[in-house]
Amino acid sequence: MFESKIPSRRELSTLNACIPPRHQRHASSPQPPSQQIELTRRSPEVYMITRHILAARLPFLSPRFNPRPFAARASAQRSIPFQLASLSHSLHTTPAVKMPEAAGAPVPHEPLVGKTETQQPPKQKQPKQQQQQQQQQQGKKNDKKEKKGGGAVTELNPPPEWFAERIKIFDDYMAKYNDFVAKQERSPITVTLPDGKQVEGTAWETTPMDIAKGISTSLADRIIIAKVDNQELWDLTRPLEKSVSLALLDFDSPENDYEARQVFWHSSAHVMGEACERSFEGCCLGYGPPLPEGGFFYDMNLANEKTIGPEDYKQIEEISKKAVKEKQKFERLSLPKEVLLEMFKYNKYKQHYINEKVPDGTESTVYRCGPLIDLCLGPHVPHTGRIKSLAVTKNSSSYFLGDKDNDSFQRVYGMSFPDSKQMTEWKKLQEEAAKRDHRKIGLQQELFFFSDLSPGSPFMLPLGMRIYNALMKFIREEYHKRGFVEVGTPNMFNSKLWQTSGHWEHYSKDMFLLKVEEEQFALKPMNCPGHCVAFDHRERSYKELPLRMAEFGVLHRNEASGALSGMTRVRRFVQDDAHIFCTVDQIGDELLGAIDFLDAVYKPFGFDYKVGLSTRNPEKWMGDLEVWNKAESSLKDVLEAKMPGRWHINEADAAFYGPKLDFDLTDALGRKWQCGTIQLDFQLPERFNLSYRGPEQPNADGTGNFHRPVMIHRAILGSLERFLAIITENCAGRWPFWLSPRQVVVIPVAALYRDYATKVAKAFSDADIYAEADLSDNTLNKKIRNAQTQQWNFILVVGQDELDAGAVNIRNRDDEVQGREETVKLEEAIAKLVKLKSERQRISKVA
């Protein structure tokens, strides 16, 4: 009786989900046995509906095909796995689909028995042409969905063999570490909090998380990392080993320029790295750091020369979400070098880091989250669940160690936050940043452009040079006030200079090298060695010190092509470099003067800034340790006196020849840019054997009163090209009057007043103000709209009234109310704008 029934439309739609639509079937993709469709045997009706559907959708089956002997229906509640993939490779299996739960009865409100009379008749066959049109339309819809969604999310199945191998090594040594911890003496310790409160704990047992939970649950849920003794960042779940002072940092803690955020983004890079390992065949991770400006990236090499593109973003994000949902713990483990080499034997890039960074006979740390185990010093968040929102933002290519002769990498960038609302706000900022992109504005306003004929070298157009020259004029005026003298040194030097300075050993790969008459030369990447030569060209006296030597030097650095980015990362640039040669006793005053100089320059732009003190890198330094310590101490004293609470330490981030101060600006979008630097250098004067004659009486042979000067490197704007990019985006192309390449445009109301407009424009030009007259045939309204779009600061409209009075009518771009309301005498207007330009105000208004 059941064979005579035809399933209703509702019954068909209920069970049709069991068979994937045509566009999802792939003959080339046989499915693993683990992916099955489950059909629940509920009643004879369900059985026959299944049979009808299979017969209709799988016509190649025998008419006598029976999924299972019908007599077995007594076990109606059992789910019977039904492997469609074993029937035909033309099917693309979907995840298991279960029928609605029921005890051998039809779905409530949808009785199946007795519906024969009311069922819809079978659909009439459509004409072949109409069927083809519908299939084409459906195909287009599916294509759009696939493009938008980025395709299905899948993981490598089975995963790479080295997943299990490195996990086994990790687990074996983690068991040994746990045994070691268990044997440590549980002595009492005291934990001192920032407010002075003391909490008792137990060594090798109490963790920072325990302390946080003792204060409040909300604090424990919010914090990211701990800091012990105001020095070392410490995992929240890592037991304390002795009495310490302890700070608990969350995402918004401002300590050391929000260093907790760097930990958060570093942990997010691990999550993204895990997603890539789980997604892409042959994925060998390289370097995955947090970025100072926010976010993170991971470099990786993939099998079969695969490249990552936007179509892969969804895959990475979805697997990352899985890792976050699992709340995978970040586990820290220290391993011997030989064990690390065994653990990462599948990854030649990690092996390179181990061989280069981990001395023989020592250990380094790895961190595990889920299946990912990565070579890393840490620290990290307690678990992946803290990362509430993660997005892949962009991708690019790079090279291992930044060397184009090495393997090519895929670099994937990401951003993450502990709250999804923060991600929404950040995306809004990114949209605004895209509108402010200096490359876009540079083309729109005809300021600068780039050409493939000289990558990394901007072409400055006339309007761009107006801004460029205004910046140089500003700095030169400050030089004059502060006792600096300008010099000019060659662009190209013999390699002997760089060998003397030490740059050849440390920096030659980043220099442009040239052969000249069989000798090795290089374009200069910095000005300091040339200034040492200029200082040493004759004998110097203590009376000449401090000698403040400045130069707008043209520099060249051989940046990798993949690292070039507009004017923020270039190969050819000009730097407002200066080097101060002084005595040891003059260091303090010169540092204070340099900081005051920076403050005076940044103020007109409205930049807030903080300072980072970069200290000695134990693996990359030269000279005497005592001298280094003395230099770092001098810088700390000056910072504490000049700007207490506005500076922090960047551990081991100094150049090889001395500690330095980095000035990080914050722009209108809250982004940070490193611009100014002040660096003490006791090394170059030694290398170049610089000296000055002191006030003491010389010996009979003329010796005995020579002393070694101290050298202070100092840059305010840094690269002028990079600073121009920063201020372009900071003001969104709405230039303050003193910097603007389009300051005054004069618009006649009719052709009759063109001569007067030309005369007015010339009068302003003679007063060193950029002015033009719009003599086009456009209407008055069109001319005004064009001037506003082009960001002219002042629009002067002239007609009969202005001609008769020798005046102009001023429309101010920065005024809330713009209109032709009053006339101002020409001489008065010029005087007001000349004064406004000299004051270098950010808001361009005249009373």
Image: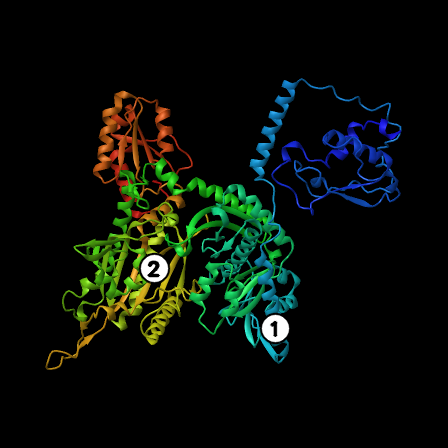
User: Which label belongs to residue 467?
Assistant: none
Count residues near mark 1 (Cα–Cα under 10 Å), then give few for <14, some for 14-19, many for 20+.
few
Q: Nearer the viewer, mark 1 or mark 2?
A: 1
Is the image coloured rainbow, by chain, by secondary structure, or in one colour? rainbow
What is the C-alpha distance between the residues marked 1 and 2? 47 Å
Q: At label 2, which amino acid type do we have?
A: Thr
Q: Which residue is mark 2?
A: 677
Q: Is residue 762 above or below residue 629?
A: above
Q: Is the N terminus in the top left, top right, bottom left or bottom right quadrant?
A: top right
Q: Quadrant of residue 39?
A: top right
Residue 200 in sight here: no
Q: Is residue 495 left or right of residue 644?
A: left
The local secondary structure at tag 2 comes to strand
Residue at coordinates 59% horizontally, 62% vertically from top-left?
165
Q: Residues within 10 Å of mark 2 (few under 14, many from 20)?
A: many
Residue type (three-letter) at the residue carrying disc 1: Lys
What residue would you read off at disc 1?
A: 176
Q: Residue at x 77, y 34 (%)?
A: 14
